[in-house]
Amino acid sequence: MKMSYFETGRYVLPPDCYDSEMGTAALRGMDERVRFVEQMGFDWMSLSEHHYSPRILTPSPVVSATWLAAHVERIKIAMLGPIVPVSNPIRIAEELAMLDTLAPGRIVVGPLRGTTNECLSYDLNPADAAKRLKRGPVSFHLKAQLAASGDPTKDPTKPWPDSRGVVDLGTITIDHVVSNSDEAQKQLLFLPTALTDGIEASDDPLIQLRGAAYAVSFSRRQ
């Protein structure tokens, strides 16, 4: 099992209330938090790319990753981005190649299309996603690492050895876009305790806590 810490910049005010001192403290505090989770034994730390977000100060994951790579020694840095449609793909590839050269073997990249908010921020048409899906479905392989006898299952800070086997659980395929995405999102509720037959939750206490937190998030979207 691999554990990742998600870093957002930890800023809680909307853009029109931005305070430069608080913003500086939030960004410079990233390396302190990442050093802490590295000492705890986390395998990855993750960054995302968002624009005009009231809570996330990472509009450029490459810049953030470069800063953090210079301040930590072992932990891998995973970027949930860059958002490809808002940038030149050649520039993205070149910047990632530079970063991988500066921190070899420690960079993990997951290019994204972005949310509707990102598209509108760059004056792009969110409906383009539907046009791209008409060319063919998008598929993801779902994999899981298998525990061995004695492996901890209730403490996410204790990773399993890399020698544990990995199985392919199947493929998730997206083949169309719903007609009204905003309304559909209000009906979505992810509960980590709502499992299919044959799968049971481990004794990790965070599973129950996340289920309660997501229920609150769902109620506030209504």
Image (cartoon, rainbow, N blue to C red):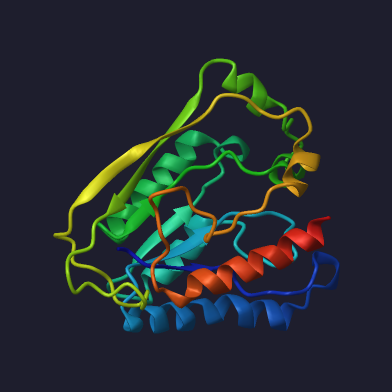
Q: Is residue 115 left or right of residue 173?
A: right
Quadrant of res 75? bottom left
| Residue 140 place in picture, x, y as percent | 42, 36
| Residue 70 place in picture, x, y as percent | 37, 72
Q: Between residues 102 and 14, which one lies in front from this camera angle?
A: 14
Which residue in the rendered view is the most extreme toward the front?
A: 197
| Residue 63 place in picture, x, y as percent | 50, 60
The tally of labels here is 0
At a point 48% along the width and 40% down the height, the residue shown is 91
At a point 72% along the width and 41% down the height, the residue shown is 116
Q: Between residues 119 and 140, which one lies in front from this camera angle?
A: 140
Q: Visible in this render: residue 164?
A: yes
Answer above or below: position of 124 versus 104.
Answer: above
| Residue 69 place in picture, x, y as percent | 37, 68
Answer above or below: position of 189 versus 201.
Answer: above
Which residue in the rendered view is the most extreme toward the left?
A: 163
Answer above or below: position of 211 versus 145.
Answer: below
At a point 60% along the width and 71% down the height, the residue shown is 9
The quadrant the N terminus occupies is bottom left
Q: Between residues 104 and 133, which one lies in front from this camera angle?
A: 133
The quadrant the C terminus occupies is bottom right
At a point 19% along the width and 74% down the height, the residue shown is 150
Quadrant of res 49? bottom right
Q: Visible in this render: residue 99?
A: no
Q: Is residue 216 left or right of residue 77?
A: right
Q: Between residues 184 and 96, which one lies in front from this camera angle?
A: 184
